[in-house]
Image (spheres, grey):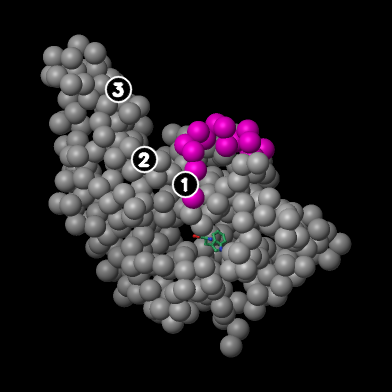
């Protein structure tokens, strides 16, 4: 039986197969008003209960959007950027927005102390999310370790899950993972303790096991809580520039972190796997294999907002009018301005931390 492991093993990139295997819905951008770049370009590709959320948006009914940050390093990556962009979409379309710092999860699965997690989150992760576009004034933050509702729900969830089920969903059942997973169930549901309403969790597809587990817990606590099952909206991974499924630290040559020195980022783009042909002549005659080109993928997923501009680049590159060196030049310029902008906004966000709203139970 196939499993998705949210803590590590890499998935096969066959996104269509994942949709079928795990009973997901194909994401339908046309159901959502003003779909963002990721939605329009099918980077967001799968969902659970998307109609419920689309309906809340259209009818202006209350709902929430929630995500968590694991503060394991002093860097974020393009995967986090996608999460923020998705959250921002829902935030701009009426969602009450929650961001939690998964300090309990980081402690139990990665051995990061609560103090270190706290410091990192305040110094870096929260400002980074703001720099990526989240509106801090419209967001409620908390640390897992400081939210009693979350902890209580986690204990309740633990009572509703069997070891066999856990193994079937996650592939293995280390005690630390069980702790992290039930805590995440608590995160996903706790806004409904105050107000029963649908909620959406925009995440990379690797987090779907948590959504499935939460939906099972919801079904089993119907008589006590009657929660709405959480909706999931899933995006693909940002591929490694060296062609792998996912940018990751284990493949440094193909990985761009946030922040990163723009010169280093451009060097990596220059070496990225391309869809260019072997000779200039061939390229002019046959055009590039755009689908294989990682620099184009970056432009499409992250760096070019305007559809017409992107389509023109696609057409020129595909027809042989544009060369790989020219495409990479564009990617490098766009990446440089994105990285510089990120650094500026990060510094600015750091100065305004006192204006944030945190849930605490001291
Ligand atoms: N497990 C998530 C991660 O590894 C973090 C997380 C904790 C989370 N609680 C959550 C994500 C609730 C979405 C919703 O990054």
Mark 3 is surrounded, within 10 Å at the Cα level, by few (under 14), some (14 to 19) or many (20 or more) other residues, namely some
N-term mark: 3 or 2? 2
Q: In terms of secondary structure, where does tag 2 sit?
A: loop
Residue drawn at the location 54% of the way across and 40% of the way down: 33
Residue at the disc numbered 2: 244
In percent of width and height, residue 330 lies at 20, 37
Considering every residue shown, the one lying at the far right of the view is 223
Q: Is residue 91 magenta?
A: no
Specify whether residue 257 is in view.
yes
Tell me if 142 is positioned left or right of 295 in this view. Answer: right
Tell me how far mark 1 sits from mark 2, CA to CA: 10 Å
Magenta stretch in the rendered image: 9-25
In the image, 284 versus 337, the foreground residue is: 284
- Would you say the residues marked 1 and 2 are in contact, meaning their CB atoms lie under 8 Å apart? yes
Residue drawn at the location 45% of the way across and 79% of the way down: 113
Question: What is the total number of numbered labels drawn onto the structure image?
Answer: 3
Considering every residue shown, the one lying at the far left of the view is 280
Residue at the disc numbered 3: 289
Residue at the disc numbered 1: 10
Specify whether residue 85 is in view.
no
Tell me how far mark 1 sits from mark 3, CA to CA: 25 Å
């Amino acid at each position: 039986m196939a499993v998705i492991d949210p803590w590590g093993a890499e998935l096969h990139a066959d996104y269509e197969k994942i949709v079928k295997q795990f009973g997901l819905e194909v994401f339908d951008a046309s159901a959502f008003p003003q779909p963002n770049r990721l939605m329009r370009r099918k980077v967001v590709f799968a969902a659970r209960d998307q109609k419920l959320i689309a309906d809340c948006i259209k009818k202006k009914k209350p709902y929430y959007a929630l995500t968590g940050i694991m503060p394991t390093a002093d860097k974020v990556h393009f995967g986090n950027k996608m999460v923020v962009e998705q959250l921002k979409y829902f935030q701009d379309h009426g969602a009450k927005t929650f961001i939690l710092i998964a300090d309990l999860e980081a402690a139990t699965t990665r051995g990061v102390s609560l103090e270190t997690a706290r410091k990192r989150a305040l110094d870096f992760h929260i400002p980074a999310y703001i720099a990526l576009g989240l509106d801090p004034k419209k967001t409620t933050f908390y640390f897992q370790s400081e939210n009693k509702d979350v902890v209580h729900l986690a204990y309740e969830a633990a009572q509703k899950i069997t070891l066999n089920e856990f193994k079937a969903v996650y592939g293995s059942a280390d005690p630390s993972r069980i702790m992290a997973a039930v805590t995440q169930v608590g995160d996903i549901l706790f806004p409904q303790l105050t107000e029963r309403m649908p909620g959406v969790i925009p995440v990379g597809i690797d987090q779907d096991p948590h959504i499935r587990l939460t939906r099972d817990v919801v079904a089993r606590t119907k008589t006590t809580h009657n929660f709405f099952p959480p909706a999931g909206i899933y995006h693909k991974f940002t591929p490694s520039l060296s062609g792998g499924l996912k940018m990751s630290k284990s493949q440094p040559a193909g990985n761009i972190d946030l922040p990163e020195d723009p010169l280093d980022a451009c060097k990596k783009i220059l070496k990225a796997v391309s869809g260019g042909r072997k000779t200039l002549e061939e390229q002019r005659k046959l055009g590039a294999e755009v689908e294989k080109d990682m620099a184009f993928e970056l432009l499409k997923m992250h760096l070019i907002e305007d559809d017409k501009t992107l389509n023109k680049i696609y057409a020129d590159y595909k027809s042989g009018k544009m060369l790989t060196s020219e495409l990479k030049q564009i990617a490098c310029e766009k990446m440089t301005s994105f990285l510089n902008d990120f650094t500026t906004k990060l510094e600015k966000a750091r100065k305004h931390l006192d204006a944030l709203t945190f849930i605490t139970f001291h």
